[in-house]
Image (spheres, grey):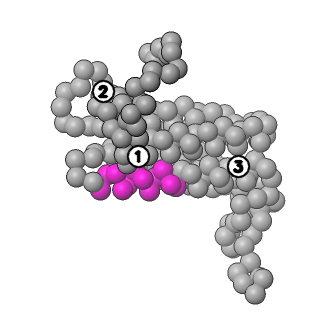
Amino acid sequence: MVVLNRIYTRTGDDGTTALGSGLRLKKYNLRIESYGTVDEANAAIGMARIHLAGQPADLDTMLFRIQNDMFDLGADLCVPDTGEKPAYEPLRITDAQVTRLETEIDTMNKHLSPLRSFVLPGGTAGAAALHVARTVTRRAERLMVALADQPGEPVTPAAIKYANRLSDFLFVASRYANEQGKLDVLWVPGKNR
């Protein structure tokens, strides 16, 4: 359980922050950038929920669940699996969370007509906000993959899959929020030449 009695500790004044293991890293470290960007994506999802104002209600329920998962993802990233026995069982993203996203994508997508062009971010405010969340999630995924490519910097495979699937979810959700694709704004290649 997390207990936050004090918000400022002054321990980060030297430009470092602590992982869940207690190890302190520079705030620009790729691991910190990764879970910081996950946090940014979570905030963008929160903003999208405000713009959606509960419409459609099933989408808001899914996004609320995802916001909780995003904290799980941040926790997964801030306690890397070093192979050593930790003092406590670290929180990890599971394949079941990835599967749930896939199921929700399929459920929304069956209400949408197939695309014949790329979709421009827009339509409704809620859909545009979901596109912002999607692009931040894609950046988080790129950072996580770059981190996993570094020697000695493990990232759980389920965490990377979750970020990848989440950006797909947010794309489909943006169309779903656009009155099931009716308000999508499609890209017209070369339209303004």
> Can you say which quadrant of the picture contains the C terminus?
bottom right
Disc 2: CA contacts within 10 A as few (<14), some (14-19) or many (>=20): few
Q: Which residues are magenta?
A: 138-149
Asked if residue 168 can be seen in this view, the reply is yes
**Upstream in sequence: badge 2 or badge 1:** 2
Q: CA distance from mark 1 to mark 3?
A: 27 Å
**SS for callout 1:** loop
Residue type highlighted by circle 3: Ala
The residue carrying mark 2 is 22
Disc 1: CA contacts within 10 A as few (<14), some (14-19) or many (>=20): few
**SS for callout 3:** helix
Asked if residue 76 can be seen in this view, the reply is no
Residue type highlighted by circle 1: Tyr
> Which residue is at a point 50% across and 45% down the rendered structure image?
37
Q: CA distance from mark 2 to mark 1?
A: 17 Å
Question: Residue 126, relative to residue 58: is it above or below?
Answer: below
Mark number, residue 129: 3
**Upstream in sequence: badge 1 or badge 3:** 1
Question: Residue 94, relative to residue 122: is it above or below?
Answer: above
- Which x, y percent locates residue 168? 56, 55
**SS for callout 2:** loop
Can you tell which of label 1 and label 3 is closer to the viewer?
A: 1
Taking the magenta stretch, the answer to whether it contains residue 43 is: no
Quarter of the view holding residue 31: top left
Q: Is residue 105 left or right of residue 23?
A: right
